[in-house]
Image: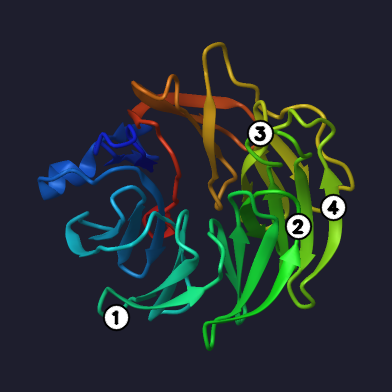
Amino acid sequence: MINEGNFRGGNGSLSFFLYDSLKIYNDLFFKVNGRPLGDVPYSMGIKGENMYIVVNNSGKIEIIDQSTLVSKATISSLISPRNISFIDDSKAYVSSLYSDSVTIINLANNSISGYINLRRTSESIVVTGNKAFISYWTEGKEIMVVNTANDQVVDSIQVGVEPESMVIDKYGMLWVLCNGGYTRQNYAELIEINTNTNSIEKTLVFPTKEASPTCLMIDGRGQTLYYLDNGVRKMDISSTDLPTVPFILPGSGQYFYKIGINPLDNDIFVTDAVDFVQQGYVLIYTGDGTFISKLKAGIIPGSMYFNLRLNS
């Protein structure tokens, strides 16, 4: 799990949760490498032996060995990087909050090998087959489709306002959560897209403009969707209606910030950012919503990733 830390504080960190003991180990990057992780580590990806931590405000990607956590390389000079998605063993795409281009990363030598000019900023990236679906997030309402063989934009799909997170289900369908925009002038939407035809199959509109859904996730079977909206919401991909009540409610004084689903057993991990200043917590529930544990993490605990190799 990565902890974003305070903006411009340079106190982002890395935590590790161990299932066997139900213990969490914090500030591991600094303990292993003797230097801070950086300013707002926002997301992470795992490929082979490496973990790629995208540090947004520091404009870099830290590449560390996933077993030892020793830093192996740093890719710098990125413009507000947000998310990384792997195309194959040698190439990855990185989205940007402020640049109009997606950065292409050469995984063989850990360098920037090129750019894809979207003419739009970007957020979430999902890859399936020879296509990458990239969301135009800030004030946007498009999903850009890129041919990963030649890194060219081949299509765009009109969706709701500010598509902020996406997942692929077991049938290869793309689900897009559009939060409606920061000012809440538009209704949030959950949209299902056929990745073969790039056409919209289903649109579910949230009942009020005050709804603020974020952080769309899916279980390991690709059958059940989860997202945050005044608690954890849960729905089957076959549903024709949005869930009307939360599956898990936050407690008094809690602020649910990010969610993760263990793909092996459907355990639900939710981070509590508290006041976005002090250390937060990670809350763990079973797949049926039963509370398991609450553990103190770093400042603004954010995105979570499950190391299946270590769990197997």
Do tag 3 and tag 1 residues touch (Cβ < 8 Å)? no
Mark 4 falls on what kind of element? strand
Q: Quadrant of the N terminus?
A: top left
Q: Position of residue 180 (x, y in %)?
A: 71, 42
| Relative to 303, 165 lies left or right | right
Q: Give the spatial CA distance, label 4 vs label 1.
A: 40 Å
Q: Give the spatial CA distance, label 4 vs label 3.
A: 21 Å
| Relative to 149, 219 lies left or right | right
Identify the mark at residue 270; answer none if there is no mark. Answer: none
Mark 3 falls on what kind of element? loop
> Between disc 4 and disc 3, whose residue precedes?
3
- Residue topped by disc 2: 159
Residue at x-position 34% and y-position 60%: 52
Q: Position of residue 201 (x, y in %)?
A: 86, 63
Q: Nearer the viewer, mark 4 or mark 1?
A: 4
- Residue topped by disc 3: 183
**Residue type highlighted by circle 2:** Val
Residue at x-position 45% and y-position 44%: 303
Q: Nearer the viewer, mark 4 or mark 3?
A: 3
Mark 2 falls on what kind of element? loop
Q: Nearer the viewer, mark 2 or mark 3?
A: 3
Residue farthest bottom in this picture: 150
- Residue topped by disc 1: 108
- Residue topped by disc 4: 203
Q: Nearer the viewer, mark 1 or mark 2?
A: 2
Which of the two residues, 109 or 182, is positioned nearer the viewer here? 182
Which color scheme did the rendering employ for the protein?
rainbow
Neighbours of disc 2 within 10 Å: few (<14), some (14-19), many (20+): many
Do tag 2 and tag 4 residues touch (Cβ < 8 Å)? no
> Between disc 1 and disc 2, whose residue precedes?
1
**Residue type highlighted by circle 1:** Ala
